[in-house]
Image: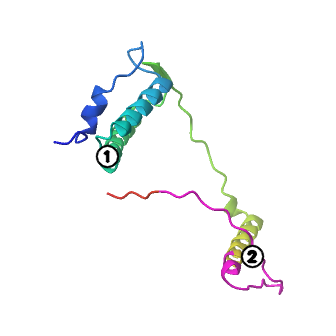
């Protein structure tokens, strides 16, 4: 069994530096950052394996959290150092029911498509005007994870 074969056991061994029975958010973040720093600096862990274990543990905790949250009554509470405030979802306006809005939205969508096309080739709008090649903004790179 490797040094990092069970993330849960490693996390159990992690001491949370607090005088409180239940740590606050700042203490949790500090302790978690120290845990990761120490695990990586020790050189005894496989970073990918540790990440994958953390991902699985996070997924399991997300399911538990969602199920428990949905079982709570829809009312405010304060317990164990956490405050919960219930907020009603409210209503959303159905803009698409307005003919003028729908026309403008359709024109905007068509213009978006023209601007995308102009990035690859010369394009002209319905009035014969050349569609400019606008600048782009790079997106943040990410790591896609699938189970």
Relative horizontal placement of residue 94, taking residue 39 as reference (left or right): right
User: Are discs 2 and 1 less than 8 Å apart at CB?
Assistant: no
Q: Residues within 10 Å of mark 2 (few under 14, many from 20)?
A: some
Which is more toward the observer, 30 or 73?
30
Relative horizontal placement of residue 118, taking residue 33 as reference (left or right): right
- What residue does disc 2 label? 133
Residue at the (42%, 30%) spot, across then down: 34
- Residue at the extreme left: 1
Q: Which residues are magenta?
A: 116-142
Is residue 67 visible from the viewing direction of this image?
no
Secondary structure beneath label 2: loop
Which is more toward the observer, 30 or 21?
30
Locate the C terminus by quadrant.
bottom left
- On the image, the x and y values in percent for residue 80 come to 42, 18
Secondary structure beneath label 1: helix
Question: Where 3 falls versus 133 (above or below)?
Answer: above
Which is more toward the observer, 140 or 93?
140
Locate the N terminus by quadrant.
top left
Could you tell me what secondary structure mostly forms the magenta stretch? loop
Going from the N terminus, do you reach mark 2 or mark 1 first? 1
What mark, if any, has residue 29 been given in the picture? none
- What residue does disc 1 label? 56
Question: Where 99 falls versus 87 (above or below)?
Answer: below
Is residue 115 visible from the viewing direction of this image?
yes
- Rounded to the nearest whole Å, what is the CA distance between mark 2 and mark 1? 44 Å
> Is residue 117 inside the magenta stretch?
yes
Residue at the (73%, 70%) spot, across then down: 108
- On the image, the x and y values in percent for residue 141 come to 53, 58
Image label count:
2
- On the image, the x and y values in percent for residue 7 come to 28, 38
Q: Residues within 10 Å of mark 1 (few under 14, many from 20)?
A: some
């Amino acid at each position: 069994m490797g040094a990092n074969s069970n993330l849960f056991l490693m996390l159990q061994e992690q001491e949370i530096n607090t005088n409180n029975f239940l740590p606050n958010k700042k203490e949790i973040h500090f302790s978690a950052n120290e845990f990761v720093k120490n695990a990586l600096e020790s050189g005894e862990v496989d970073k990918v394996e540790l990440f994958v274990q953390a991902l699985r543990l996070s997924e399991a905790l997300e399911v538990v959290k969602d199920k428990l949250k949905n079982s709570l009554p829809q009312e405010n509470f304060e317990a164990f150092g956490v405050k919960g405030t219930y907020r009603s979802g409210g209503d959303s306006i159905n803009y698409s029911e307005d003919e003028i809005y729908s026309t403008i939205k359709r024109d905007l969508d068509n213009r978006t498509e023209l601007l995308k096309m102009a990035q690859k080739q010369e394009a002209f709008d319905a009035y014969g005007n050349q569609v400019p090649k606008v600048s782009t903004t790079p997106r943040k790179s990410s790591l896609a994870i699938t189970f």
